[in-house]
Amino acid sequence: MNIDEEEVDKVVLALLYLTSFQEGEIKRSWKSYDWSVMDHLHEKGYISDPKNKNKSVVFSELGEEQGKLLVSKYFTKAG
């Protein structure tokens, strides 16, 4: 099977945003996804470095914007 890793990254970012929570000024999400995908999202500047002792990651401004757009693309109903 030929997996489109870019699409996987987009869907995981959307899921991270969909399940995120606000902590003061910071939007966080639990880091419960594949490490390689989390690393990709960090390298793209969407989330903080997942390699730490925290159980969650912090969204960058760009990550929040992209996450919101991707949730709309993948998870909203037309109409």
Image (cartoon, rainbow, N blue to C red):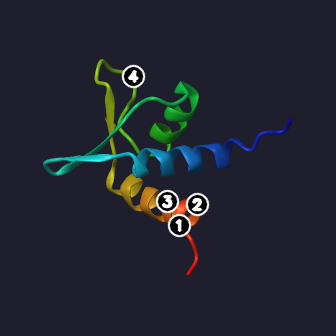
**Where is 68 relative to 38, above or below?**
below
Give x and y (percent) for residue 60. Answer: 33, 49
Disc 3 designates what residue? 71
What's the amino acid at mark 4? Lys
Q: Secondary structure at mark 3?
A: helix
Which residue is rendered at x = 59% and y = 44% of the image?
9
Say whether marks 2 and 1 touch (CB < 8 Å). Answer: yes
Q: Secondary structure at mark 2?
A: helix
Q: Residues within 10 Å of mark 4 (few under 14, many from 20)?
A: few
What's the amino acid at mark 2? Tyr
Disc 4 designates what residue? 51
Q: Gap in Å between the C-alphas at discs 3 and 1?
A: 7 Å
Label 4 vs 1, first from the N-terminus = 4
Foreground disc of the pair 4, 3: 3
Which residue is rendered at x = 28% and y = 24% of the image?
54
Foreground disc of the pair 3, 1: 1
Say whether marks 4 and 2 touch (CB < 8 Å). Answer: no
Foreground disc of the pair 4, 1: 1
Q: Residues within 10 Å of mark 3 (few under 14, many from 20)?
A: some
Q: Gap in Å between the C-alphas at discs 4 and 1?
A: 31 Å
What's the amino acid at mark 3? Val
Furthest toward the top, the residue is: 53
Foreground disc of the pair 4, 2: 2
Say whether marks 3 and 1 touch (CB < 8 Å). Answer: yes
Disc 1 designates what residue? 76
Q: Gap in Å between the C-alphas at discs 4 and 2?
A: 27 Å
Give x and y (percent) for residue 75. Answer: 54, 60
